[in-house]
């Protein structure tokens, strides 16, 4: 599963290395463990630091909502 995240900056301030957090829902059975997620820079294709927490789970134990 691939999800593209675009965060526009509308105030005209250069933002470099600032933290961002958001919740991401997953269908039942798709994500067994939050640590399996990764964040990749689209330009450089480099893996970026990522902290993930499973906030809610489906009845089968898979992640329903993850906080990234």
Image: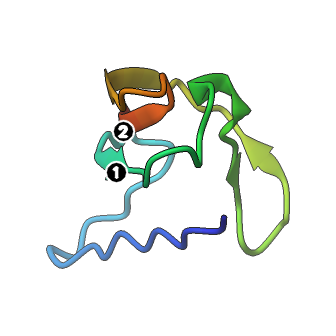
Residue for point 55% across, 44% down: 29
Residue for point 14% across, 73% down: 11
State the image coordinates of residue 15 (x, y, percent, origin top left). Answer: 38, 56
Instruction: Name the residue that disc number 2 marks.
Output: 64
Instruction: Name the residue that disc number 1 marks.
Output: 25
Q: On the rendered structure, is 33 left or right of 15?
A: right
Residue for point 35% across, 43% down: 20
Q: Is residue 38 above or below residue 49?
A: below
Q: On the rendered structure, is 25 left or right of 12?
A: right
Q: On the rendered structure, is 28 left or right of 58?
A: right
- 9 or 23, which lies in front? 23
Mark 1 closeness class: few <14, some 14–19, many ≥20 residues within 10 Å: some
- Quarter-wise, where is residue 36 in the image? top right
N-terminal of the two: label 1 or label 2?
A: 1
Is residue 68 at least partly visible in the picture? no
- 29 or 68, which lies in front? 29
- 60 or 52, which lies in front? 60
State the image coordinates of residue 50 (x, y, percent, origin top left). Answer: 59, 32
- Image quadrant occupied by the C terminus: top left
Q: Are marks 1 and 2 in contact (CB under 8 Å)?
A: yes
């Amino acid at each position: 599963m691939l999800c593209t995240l675009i965060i526009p900056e509308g105030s005209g301030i250069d933002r470099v290395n600032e933290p961002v957090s958001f919740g991401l829902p997953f269908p039942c059975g798709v994500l067994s463990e939050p640590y399996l997620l990764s964040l990749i820079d689209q330009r450089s294709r480099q893996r970026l630091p990522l902290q993930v927490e499973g906030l809610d789970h489906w009845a089968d134990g898979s992640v329903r909502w993850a906080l990234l």
